[in-house]
Amino acid sequence: VEAIETNGGGTTSLKAQNINIQASEAGLVANEGSIEVEASHLVVAAAGENSQALVAQANVEGNVAAIKIAADSTMISATSGAGITATSYGKVDISGDLTVDAEDVISARGNSTVNINQNGSAKVVLNGNVAFSTPGSEGDAGEDVNANVNIRLTGAGSQWTGNAYASAPEGVTTTNVKGMNVALINGAQWNPTLVEGLDPHGNPASVQSINIFEFSDGVINLSETGAQTVA
């Protein structure tokens, strides 16, 4: 399957043993619609420039734009772009074992929500950053970079290699992010990386603090951050 998009308030349900989506731009897109996936194995790969494997965008508060994935194992990748994108009140919920490989594993803004492994029973591997980012009006987007990103890493096989950053055009505030929440439990690891340079829109990126950090027998490896503060 190349790509699946739901809009106009509709709902698309996918149920199969194995689902493989190979897209050139975006794989699963909920644009004022809902997508529900149940599978043993789900693969969503986006290979194009500035690609996005998953996109949930409601545009207006009160509209529904949701992607809900319940799979034994999910693999998400984006060659150049974001693995999971949630904007403008969009919502993404993923349960089950998960691996995401992308420059930005999650890109969120506009009071959207991304929930990863909230029941704490799965192995989660995230390779890439979490971005609270907007291109602003020049990119046909709003200016609010706040969003709720809830990541629960449990067990020695779970890890996040990357960092959280905020970015926006000059004159747009990035200090209002209140929803970057991470749990590191029972041997799960966070390997923070250095945040520097520009975001994919060409705007300066700065480190975003973890707003709520739940820590119990987790591991934080600081070898890749240099003198940069991790908070």
Image: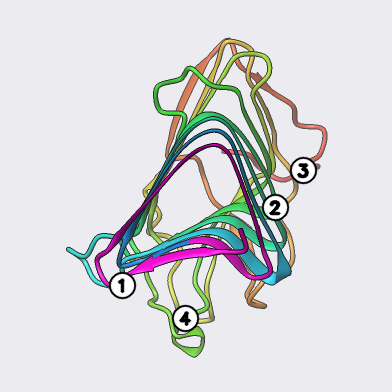
Provide the residue designation for mark 1: 59
Q: Which mark's residue is nearer the viewer, 4 or 1?
A: 1
Q: Within the image, what quadrant is residue 166 found in?
A: bottom right
Q: Which mark's residue is nearer the viewer, 2 or 4?
A: 2
Mark 2 residue type: Ala
Disc with the residue nearer the chain's start (2 vs 4):
2
**Is residue 199 at least partly visible in the picture?**
no
In the image, which disc is placed on residue 120?
none
Give the percent coordinates (x, y) of residue 98. Answer: 59, 33
Mark 3 residue type: Ala
In magenta stretch: residue 16? yes
Residue at image position (53%, 81%) is 170
Mark 4 residue type: Gly
Mark 1 residue type: Asn
Contact (Cβ within 8 Å) of mark 3 with mark 4: no
Q: Residues within 10 Å of mark 4 (few under 14, many from 20)?
A: some
Contact (Cβ within 8 Å) of mark 3 with mark 2: no
Q: Which mark's residue is nearer the viewer, 3 or 2?
A: 2
Secondary-structure class at tag 1? loop
**Image: magenta residue range:** 1-28
Give the percent coordinates (x, y) of residue 9. Answer: 24, 66
In this rendering, the count of numbered labels is: 4
Mainly helix, strand or loop, the magenta region? strand
Give the percent coordinates (x, y) of residue 7. Answer: 34, 70
Provide the residue designation for mark 2: 102
Disc with the residue nearer the chain's start (3 vs 4):
4
